[in-house]
Image (cartoon, helix red, strand yellow):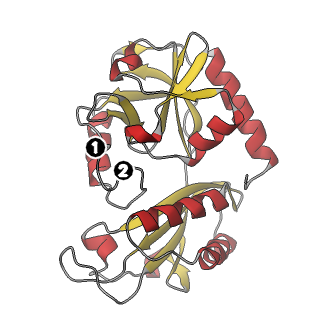
């Protein structure tokens, strides 16, 4: 794998970040992960804009998006894959061993890595822990991911590839690294960002390209919906064939139609405005 850290490109084995970097010590940073196909990143502009929004929401300086775009190009020119992932991380940089930030400047890291395509359908599990929609980090893609790691590890003990969380109000919210969609009587719904979910890039494109309504829904909808699918930057539109102990025929007709629209539109333009 190849990386770029604060202006220096190198193999990942030679890359280094300070052990007192706040992204490492307290998770004080933001990130983006996007898919690459034969070295071409998908929706890079949208990911960079969200990176900037997350940074501002965390109180960090606005990142130099032109610099990050150039770094991504350099890394992908050095190492690309038929199907890969590009990770962009932006932290507050080195700081004290506590919550106070330092003044040495931000850290920017870009890594290109191979990815494994997801299977045609997937299994999800309801998480026993909720998402706090009132958290100061709600809606921001931060490196403070330990909560997600715990929830996902728990879901994987039952064979699921993703954990889906309710919010504190008991409404369906999101997965640890995905957005959730439900189909009821031929109509498609997804939780609004006000319920605490991240405004995923794939989620936003599905909302723009397909007939989908944002709606608050109880967590119990997972047990009654006709179809379910999750979306993420590496999954695209991923049909769900099992949630907890419930089996579903997947992909259902609505999910299949949305997946086709997404595939066609994303193939036309690798960087949709």
Q: Residue at x 28, y 41 (%)?
A: 151
Q: List the single residue furthest toward the right.
A: 268
Label 1 sits on residue: 132
Residue 8 found in image quarter: bottom right
Pointer 1 or 2: first along the chain: 1
Position of residue 7 relative to residue 218, above or below, is below
Q: Residue at x 23, y 32 (%)?
A: 128
- Seen from the viewer's position, the closer of residues 175 and 187 is 187
Whether tag 1 and tag 2 are in contact, CB under 8 A, the answer is: yes
Position of residue 143 relative to residue 264, above or below, is below
Q: Secondary structure at mark 2?
A: loop
Q: Residues within 10 Å of mark 1 (few under 14, many from 20)?
A: some
Residue 224 visible in this rendered orientation of the protein: yes
| Residue 103: image location, x then y, percent | 33, 88
Label 2 sits on residue: 138
Q: Secondary structure at mark 1?
A: loop
Q: Residues within 10 Å of mark 2 (few under 14, many from 20)?
A: some
- Seen from the viewer's position, the closer of residues 212 and 263 is 212
Residue 160 visible in this rendered orientation of the protein: no
Q: Residue at x 56, y 47 (%)?
A: 234
- Is residue 80 shown left or right of residue 145? right
Position of residue 69 relative to residue 93, above or below, is above
């Amino acid at each position: 794998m190849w990386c770029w850290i604060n202006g220096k490109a190198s193999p990942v084995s030679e890359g280094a970040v300070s052990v007192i970097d706040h992204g490492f010590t307290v998770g004080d940073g933001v990130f983006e992960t996007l898919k690459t196909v034969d070295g071409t990143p998908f929706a890079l502009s949208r990911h960079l804009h969200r990176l900037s929004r997350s940074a501002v929401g965390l109180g960090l300086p606005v990142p130099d998006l032109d610099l990050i775009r150039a770094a991504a190009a350099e890394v992908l020119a050095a190492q690309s894959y038929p199907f890969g992932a590009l990770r962009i991380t932006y932290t507050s940089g080195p700081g004290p061993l506590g919550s106070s930030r330092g003044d040495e400047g931000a850290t920017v890291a870009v890594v290109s890595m191979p990815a494994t395509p997801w299977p045609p359908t997937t299994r999800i599990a309801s998480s026993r822990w909720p998402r706090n929609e009132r958290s100061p980090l709600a809606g921001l893609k931060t490196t403070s991911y330990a909560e997600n790691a715990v929830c996902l590890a728990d879901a994987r003990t039952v064979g699921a590839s993703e954990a889906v969380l309710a919010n504190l109000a008991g409404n369906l919210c999101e997965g640890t690294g995905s957005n959730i969609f439900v189909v009821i009587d031929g109509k498609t719904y997804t939780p609004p960002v006000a319920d605490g979910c991240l405004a995923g890039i794939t989620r936003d494109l599905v909302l723009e390209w397909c007939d989908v309504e944002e709606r608050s829904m109880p967590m119990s909808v997972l047990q009654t919906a006709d179809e379910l699918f999750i979306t993420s930057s590496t999954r695209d539109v991923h049909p769900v064939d099992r949630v907890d102990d419930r089996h579903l025929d997947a992909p259902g007709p609505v999910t299949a139609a949305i997946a086709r629209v997404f595939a066609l539109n994303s193939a036309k333009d690798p960087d949709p405005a």
